[in-house]
Image (cartoon, rainbow, N blue to C red):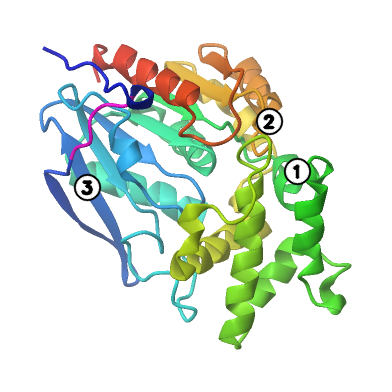
């Protein structure tokens, strides 16, 4: 009998991996992966956000463990993957979207999986779209939340002042923490330089300021102070490095290419979940993707922002994975 979700925000009970390992992705890179649930269940893979957040126990609980073979992994240079971006000497040149997509495929092949459901939120949503459009025959379904489509306007909205109209105090602090000489330039480039400064105090202060900004925008009204996950200085430094590294390159995604190529998803069932008050990923992103990918269902959660652990968002994600559990992989 399939167990019912736990009462806590609709999540399934906490589980532990039955298998884990390190995937050699070349050039000294090792990507941590784990599998949970039913070894003979329907395969599903989770693409975490950030980029650089790492996978969490919460991701495991979005799936019925009796029905799914759940695959989680930490993307390059974060979480339990090595080398770790928390070490300032670690070169991030090999950490790019094309290589992350290749890592997903290499992991699938190594685990002997033919097709799998792909779940991703925020940056993980963008990565899921890139992967699914390049490898549609390997994707049985898509479950996406905090919808992002890799357009330049989306990067500028969140990281170059667009959303500051709703968070002026927090944005002013982010800019005010820059040296005077950096004040008139690109904020992302400026923080990239500070995060690479030879002085560890400069690097850590830059990471603190960047993560304070990241802490402000997931919920409405804005939260005060630093989000709990950023209290670990090594995590916050690695996160800030990886995010700014991707944003300064517009994630190596051609502007609007994911919407242009959404026709490749025509045979892939999908569910998109977005908070109505998501200031990081405004519902206009999801609306644009829905127009390009008509087969997908769009669910808007009225009382939610970007925070993925909002009860309404969680319940919709679990409903989606429950629905797809009965479909053949």
Residue 1: image location, x then y, percent:
10, 12
Circle 3: element type: strand
- For mark 2, what is the residue? 282
Q: Hey, which quadrant is residue 247 in on the image?
A: bottom right
Q: Which residue is drawn at 55% across and 21% down?
A: 263
Q: Please report whichever mark, 1 or 3, sits nearer to the chain's N-terminal start.
A: 3
Q: Hey, which quadrant is residue 142 in on the image?
A: top left
Query: Distance between the Cα atoms at labels 3 and 2?
Result: 32 Å
Alpha-carbon neighbours of circle 3 within 10 Å: few (<14), some, or many (≥20)?
some
Query: Distance between the Cα atoms at labels 2 and 1?
Result: 10 Å
With respect to residue 179, does 125 lie above or below?
above
Q: Do the residues labelled 2 and 1 touch (CB within 8 Å)?
A: yes
Near-viewer residue (148 or 301) = 301
- For mark 3, what is the residue? 34
Near-viewer residue (304 or 124) = 304
Circle 1: element type: helix
Query: Distance between the Cα atoms at labels 1 and 3?
Result: 34 Å
Residue 109: image location, x then y, percent:
23, 43
Majority secondary structure of the magenta segment? loop
- For mark 1, what is the residue? 157
Circle 2: element type: loop
- Whether residue 262 is visible here, answered yes or no, is yes
Residue 200: image location, x then y, percent:
56, 84
Residue range highlighted in magenta? 11-15
């Amino acid at each position: 009998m399939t167990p019912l979700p736990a009462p806590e925000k609709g999540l399934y009970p906490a589980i532990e991996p039955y298998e884990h390992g390190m995937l050699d992705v070349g050039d000294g890179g090792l990507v941590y992966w784990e599998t949970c649930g039913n070894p003979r269940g329907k395969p599903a893979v989770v693409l975490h956000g950030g980029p650089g957040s790492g996978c969490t126990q919460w991701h495991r609980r979005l799936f019925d463990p009796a029905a799914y073979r759940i695959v989680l992994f930490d993307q390059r240079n974060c979480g339990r993957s090595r080398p770790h971006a928390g070490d300032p000497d670690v070169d991030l040149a090999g950490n790019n979207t094309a290589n992350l997509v290749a890592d997903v495929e290499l992991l699938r092949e190594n685990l002997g999986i033919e097709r799998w459901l792909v779940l991703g939120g925020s940056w993980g949503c963008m990565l899921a779209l890139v992967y699914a459009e390049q490898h549609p025959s390997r994707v049985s379904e898509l479950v996406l939340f905090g919808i992002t489509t890799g357009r330049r306007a989306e990067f500028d909205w969140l990281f170059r002042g667009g959303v500051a109209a709703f968070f002026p105090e927090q944005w002013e602090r982010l800019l005010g923490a820059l040296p005077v000489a950096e004040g008139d330039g690109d904020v992302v480039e400026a923080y990239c330089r500070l995060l690479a400064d030879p002085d560890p105090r400069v690097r850590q202060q830059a990471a603190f300021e960047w993560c304070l900004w990241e802490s402000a925008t997931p919920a409405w009204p804005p939260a005060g102070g630093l989000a709990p996950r950023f209290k670990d200085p090594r995590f916050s430094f690695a996160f800030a490095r990886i995010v700014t590294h991707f944003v300064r390159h517009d994630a190596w995604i051609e502007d609007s290419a994911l919407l242009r190529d959404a026709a490749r998803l025509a045979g892939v069932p999908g569910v998109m979940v977005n908070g109505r008050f998501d200031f990081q990923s405004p519902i206009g992103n999801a609306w644009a993707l829905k127009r390009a990918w008509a087969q997908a269902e769009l669910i808007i959660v009225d009382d939610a922002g970007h925070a993925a652990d909002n009860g309404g968002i969680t319940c919709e994600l679990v409903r989606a994975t429950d629905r797809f559990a009965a479909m053949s992989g």
